[in-house]
Image: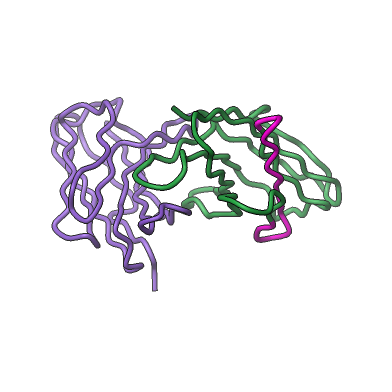
Chain colours: A green, B purple
Amino acid sequence: AQSVTQLGSHVSVSEGALVLLRCNYSSSVPPYLFWYVQYPNQGLQLLLKYTTGATLVKGINGFEAEFKKSETSFHLTKPSAHMSDAAEYFCAVKGGTGFQKLVFGTGTRLLVSP
Amino acid sequence: DTAVSQTPKYLVTQMGNDKSIKCEQNLGHDTMYWYKQDSKKFLKIMFSYNNKELIINETVPNRFSPKSPDKAHLNLHINSLELGDSAVYFCASSPPEGYGYTFGSGTRLTVV
């Protein structure tokens, strides 16, 4: 079975500051890992994903995440926050290929102040 | 051209009613899903269909019945609506290898 823990239901940063959203996972098989963003009253948009290969993955809008197997982590970072980054961010895990469900964390609300 | 489209976007109905939410994808994906997002933003899978066949059925009340007439459509019918059914319901689809899911914009269901 797979599970995801996102530390911090809310993270506040100033515009231009580093963004770090934490995600730890549990998986009985090699995981596929994802970060999604949800803007108010909208659906979920895929930011980036890790399946196999390079452990540092780059996504849209300047975000990146690093898969660290030893730490069972997949933290999301962005060097410089922008006001438009304010949204809800979800980390998700899937147990490899095949008909495995995508399991989401509880989400982290990113607040960006001027 | 919307990849995964859901209708309606908003649905307000009284307790005890029966309602349906429709979902269509034009991505050519084989697998479709229904997720429920509660008031605390928690996302939980309800059902998954692969090429019209039910493959994931979480512990969802049997008042919820998914129907997939073809692999591009997955509808959700809910009987005898209850207050606790109020949530945002998301449809999603994925390719066979199940990498990234593409989500619809959601249906906000309010039961009064």
Number of marks in the rendered image: 0
B34 displayed left or right of A46:
left
Quick one: quadrant of the C terminus of chain B?
A: top left
- Image point (59%, 46%), residue name: A35
B68 displayed left or right of B34:
left
Corner quadrant of residue A4? top right
State the extent of the magenta-drawn residues as a range: A58-72
Q: Is residue B15 magenta?
A: no
- Image point (36%, 61%), residue name: B4
- Residue A53: horizontal and vertical position, in percent? 63, 53
Quick one: quadrant of the N terminus of chain B?
A: bottom left
- Residue A70: horizontal and vertical position, in percent? 70, 31
Relative vertical location of residue B14 with respect to residue A79 in this rendering, above or below: above
Judging depth in this view, the residue of B81 and A69 nearest the camera is: A69
- Image point (66%, 58%), residue name: A59
- Residue A103: horizontal and vertical position, in percent? 46, 36
Relative vertical location of residue B30 with respect to residue B81 in this rendering, above or below: below
B16 displayed left or right of A3:
left
- Residue A64: horizontal and vertical position, in percent? 71, 52
- Image point (54%, 33%), residue name: A105
B21 displayed left or right of B97:
left
